[in-house]
Amino acid sequence: MRSPRGSFVIASRHSMRPTHHTLCLLFAMASVELGLSSAQAAEQPRMRGIAETRSGEKHEGWIRMAGTKMIVDLVNGGGSKEIGASELKVAHMHLAGTPKPQQSLPGLRGKYFPRAEFGGTPITRIDPVVNFGWGGGSPMGGFPADNFTVRWEGEVEAPVSGNYQFHTSSNDGARLWVDGRNIIDRWIGQMETEHSGTIQLQAGRRYALRLEHFEGQRAAAMKLLWTPPGGAKSIIPKGHLWHSPATATRHAANGLNGAYFKNRNLQGNPIERTDPRVDFHWDRGGHPPGIPRENFSVRWTGAIEGPVNGKITFTTRTDDGVRLWVGGRKLIDQWRDMAATEHRGDFEMKAGARYPIRIEYFQGASLAEAQLFWNGPSLNRQIIPSSRLFASTSGSGGSDTGVHLKGGTFLAGIIRGVDKRNVELTTTENETLRIPRLYVSALQFARIDPGMRSRMKTSEPGSLLWNGDYFPSELVSIDTEKARLTSILFGPRTLKRSQVRFVKFDDFVKTGKAAFEVRTKSGSRIRALEIALDGKNAAVKDGSRYRIKLAPEDVTSVFGIGD
């Protein structure tokens, strides 16, 4: 059985047939062994990639996996290399004939908010290092010099094993998380002051990093330093800070992620912000700081939710060029200089289903405008509202929403509903899972920061609300409007679904041993005891001995753990 592109199946000893479209979760299976024979794998070596070991060796070729071993059939007939879980650092791969996956890029992704407490529309840029002494000036043109906040996210790579001291030198407040641990927390007004925290890291591994800073009045500074084992204190240098490319598949705030380029060719490092809708007359203003009034381009990405069932007509009105994709289909392609002109394309949608959307626009000279409309059955023509648009997210925190399983696996997607038996999850490829609650440890309705995650680890089962309250309780059900809970102290309670941020059923932290961590395009992270992988099949036994069947093209990387 092969699942279609982008989907996966979790199966049991009782059935290997999917029961809900092409993506289903059945029961745990421990008795069937994973693995392909060497002869079978050799006949179909179609996963191409580069595997890097902890000792720094890199091996490029066709990748297949059996159990706890990775086999790389080297390019140019150079034989084969077998790599165990404890030896593997990471392997990045793609299915032959498909685009290579985007790998981590240098630097941290910095989101600069023009108001205190991360308020206002942020400007995003990539900072190679964090070593800023702004004094009385501004971080960038058109941005305030006082009362702003910044959040940097990405990964830090350890060159050697041992205890690392991290240091912040800031004016004013600073908070730092490494590998989910809040090691520095000095969220206070202060002259430039240094604070430190210690954590143990392993050579060659990358760890999630998040740094937050607020600036009050007058002088501003923010520096991120470390003291490696046996080394001297220094600014964390280039080559040790990384970020993931932004993707359009992960649920976030309403609107679309807008990447603004200082040229008409969508090239170079963009300035990013979330735009609630595409409805711009830039000759009246509204450019992000640092973007010229002429000869610029924009790429909007995210997801769009179907308003009704049936054929929806999309209309762009632009001056100048425009291209539009919905659900992976190119509906409009008018990449040329022109006065304000309308173009149309049709797409069949289902009410409530979400589809990836991408819009590209360039401005030449003189007037500049871009608008995106739709109309359809019982739907009058209108600018597509922000309530139907969902921006992408990025950074090291992973997907904003999804389901945690008891083996430490996280399945990314949008939680549609919960009843006494199942959790219904729509993946970013619009496939639907019905997951038995027996195997679910937590539900994540929005991103939670590392400090809050640590708090949840030690809490009894219950619900975290958006106002910060934690309500010890048992979840009865969730639908599109309501969340129904019951507790020993307060009895039955009904809340608005929008009030609930996180629900803990059971321990959702990484449990048990694992040999690998598998990451997918959709944002899922699967802790695997064993993997069977070639160009036609991918099967993973996760830490709780679930068997998960993946489409090989959905696998982007495998990290060695070797617990």
Image: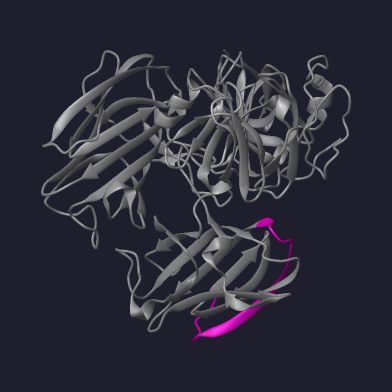
Closest to the observer: 538 or 300? 300
For image coordinates 79% across by 44% down, the residue present is 4
Residue 461 percent location from the top left of the image: 56, 25
Closest to the observer: 289 or 419? 419
Left or right of 172, for residue 337: right
Vertical placement of 237 versus 108: above or below? above
Residue 399 percent location from the top left of the image: 54, 40
Vertical placement of 461 versus 130: above or below? above
Is there any visible trace of residue 80 in the rendered image? Answer: no
Vertical placement of 112 versus 235: above or below? below
Q: Quadrant location of the C terminus?
A: top right
Considering every residue shown, the one lying at the far front of the view is 490
Is there any visible trace of residue 175 in the rendered image? Answer: yes
Task: Quadrant for residue 109, please give it.
Answer: top left
Segment colored magenta: 334-354
Task: Quadrant for residue 143, please give it.
Answer: bottom left
For image coordinates 40% across by 27% down, the residue present is 157
Closest to the observer: 223 or 454? 454
Check residue 86 for magenta coloring.
Answer: no
Check residue 352 for magenta coloring.
Answer: yes
Q: How many marks?
A: 0
Task: Quadrant for residue 140, please give it.
Answer: bottom left
Residue 170 percent location from the top left of the image: 19, 36
Left or right of 113, for residue 10: right
Left or right of 489, for residue 345: right
For image coordinates 71% across by 29% down, the residue present is 437
Residue 528 percent location from the top left of the image: 65, 22
